Image (cartoon, rainbow, N blue to C red):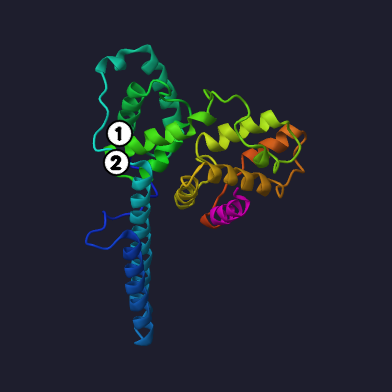
Amino acid sequence: MYLGCTGGCPGGPPHGEHAPGALLDLVEFAIDSGMVACVNRGVGMGVFTIWHSAYIYYTSSARMHLREAQWRRHYHIPSTLPKMHDRFLLSKVWQNQQHVLAIDIARMPPMRIENVTKIIRRFAATSPYAGYTQGNLYLMYAVGLVFSDELSVFWAYARTVRLVHRYGPSTPYGTHVVPDWVIAHAPAVLDRDLWDILIRFRWLYIMFGQTVSTATGLLATWDYCLQGEAHLFSLCAALLLRGHALDFDACESNLERATLIIGQNIESTEHAAALISQAQLLLR
């Protein structure tokens, strides 16, 4: 992978005339048939295990190819990179952004720092309205799990930053960005404006990068969120609703209760799937 992000599926892009969905069906059918044949013929568990390993490898690989194709359609990736001027590298603006980037890199999983910096530098030089701000690397990491070339990573990252810009510290929309129907699912421990800020900064602005802790779960969450803003908000509502079941016994203040809710961690793919299912039920 171009960014060296861990957790991505192995293998190159699919070949041939099969569409991604058809490829997935084809691979699953072939592997399933092989597993059934092993059992019917009384083949030992060693061979069965090989078939099972192949099943996991190829179906997950096919799903990643399908995801990549869907994300490419969503992001409408151009064929060229925007040009940047080298003098930007000498600016005080870039020096400040580099400092913030270095802090973020130190607390992220391993990535290819040279390539990460290259993408961020080009984006900062060509997108003065945003540049690099704290937390943007969570967006970069998710994009790097799916795309393996500089062009795709750059444009997917740039367009994701544009998508979440309204939820960040420079939003032109004030403190009423998150709809009332979402905040209605929150416990009455903070006022509306404080919930709005917490939801935007912790969940929306980094696309749940600090909330979903597995690569598979994070990508599934993005698959859902990239369908539109309503899906983003619905996922926030599902997290707030999930927060009602947390153990607040150790909390001594309403702020601590809110912090516990906003700091939820989705630790497994199964929990991520349950959260997305709940979000779909709440979708407006």
Q: Is residue 146 visible?
A: no
Q: Which residues are magenta?
A: 271-284
Percent of width and height locating residue 135: 48, 31
**Residue carrying label 1:** 115
Percent of width and height locating residue 56: 38, 64
Q: Nearer the N terminus, badge 2 or badge 1?
A: 2
Mark drawn on residue 164: none
Pick the front one: 232 or 1: 232
Instruction: Kindly check if marks 2 and 1 are in contact, taking CB atoms under 8 A apart as contact.
Output: yes
| Three-letter amino acid code at the position of disc 2 | Tyr
Q: In the rendered structure, does residue 276 fall within the stretch colored magenta?
A: yes
Secondary structure mostly seen in magenta is helix
Percent of width and height locating residue 28: 36, 69
Up-down: is 143 above or below 130? below
Mark drawn on residue 2: 2
Up-down: is 106 above or below 223? above
Q: In the rendered structure, does residue 24 fall within the stretch colored magenta?
A: no
